[in-house]
């Protein structure tokens, strides 16, 4: 009986996979235990693509795998480099949040995702939190590595607005970080952060009630500046 599915993809000339949107070929892997028999994947093969249904997790026996995200305009950002002993494919969502591609011929063990009905609730909650943190680190890597200064600031403000912490009933969000702390977090200078905030205020895309409280009148217009659409 097939117990896991490994996704492979056609490669571009020169040995680099097509990445997001690649044509995936489903290959069944049959063995008695998903954790016992390693599967060998050729170099520069797509294990899964961002947006694929997340049914499996993967352990690297030997070899190397890179995880990457692709922005709508085609910019690609590597978010993790993994080697023997590392695990990937962890997500608390129904789809993978990034793509995975082998760098060299790699042996993988393929397992089904954690079934929370089979483990204590405390362990399930802990796993969910770890998966959430991994997804947030991947997103932050994209923000730091591929987005412009304005896209970084907009993405940061949108993330704050999506969080429950510090939100008022009228929709205003607390900006608890100083401009310097924002700059440190986003890899920018304080002058660049200040200029970006001033430009967003000038356009009417953010409105500050006080120095540390703001709201976003037009979320769709802000999202169009985030680099994610």
Image (spheres, rainbow, N blue to C red):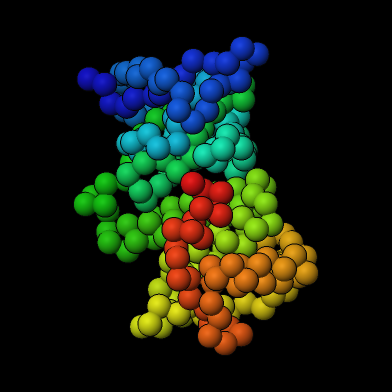
In the picture as drawn, the residue positioned furthest to the front comes out as: 203
Q: Quadrant of residue 176?
A: bottom right
- Residue depicted at 26% across the width and 21% down the height: 2
Q: Relative to 42, does residue 109 appear above or below in the rendering?
A: below
- The N terminus is located in which quarter? top left
In the rendered structure, the answer to whether residue 85 lies left or right of residue 217 reads right
Q: Is residue 61 visible?
A: no
In the rendered structure, the answer to whether residue 53 lies left or right of residue 109 reads left
* Residue 156, percent from left and from top: 57, 63
* Residue 117, percent from left and from top: 21, 52
Q: Nearer the viewer, residue 71 or 219?
A: 219
Q: Relative to 48, does residue 86 appear above or below in the rendering?
A: below
Q: Nearer the viewer, residue 3 or 11?
A: 11
In the picture as drawn, the residue positioned furthest to the top comes out as: 13
In the rendered structure, the answer to whether residue 183 lies left or right of residue 103 reads right
Q: Nearer the viewer, residue 122 or 91?
A: 91
* Residue 15, percent from left and from top: 62, 15
Q: How many marks?
A: 0
- Residue depicted at 39% across the width and 55% down the height: 127
- Residue depicted at 61% across the width and 12% down the height: 13
């Amino acid at each position: 009986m097939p117990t896991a599915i490994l996704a492979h993809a056609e490669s571009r000339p020169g040995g680099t996979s097509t990445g997001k949107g690649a044509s995936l070929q489903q290959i069944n892997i049959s063995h008695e235990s998903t954790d016992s028999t390693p599967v060998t994947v050729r170099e520069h093969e797509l294990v899964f693509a961002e947006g694929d249904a997340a049914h499996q997790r993967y352990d690297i026996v030997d070899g190397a795998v890179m995880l990457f995200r692709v922005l709508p305009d085609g910019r690609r950002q590597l978010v993790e480099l993994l080697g023997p002993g590392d695990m990937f494919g962890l997500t608390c969502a129904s789809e993978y949040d990034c793509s995975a591609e082998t760098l060299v011929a790699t042996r993988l063990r393929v397992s089904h995702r954690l079934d929370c009905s089979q483990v204590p609730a405390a362990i399930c909650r802990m796993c969910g939190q770890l998966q959430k943190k991994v997804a947030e680190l991947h997103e932050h890597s994209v923000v730091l590595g591929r987005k412009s200064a304005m896209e970084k600031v907009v993405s940061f403000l949108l993330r704050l607005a999506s969080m429950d912490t510090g939100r008022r009933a009228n929709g205003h969000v607390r900006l608890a970080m100083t401009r310097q702390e924002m700059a440190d977090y986003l890899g920018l200078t304080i002058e660049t952060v200040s200029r970006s905030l001033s430009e967003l205020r000038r356009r009417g895309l953010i409105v500050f009630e006080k120095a540390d409280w703001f709201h976003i009148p037009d979320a769709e217009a802000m999202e169009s500046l985030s680099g994610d659409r």
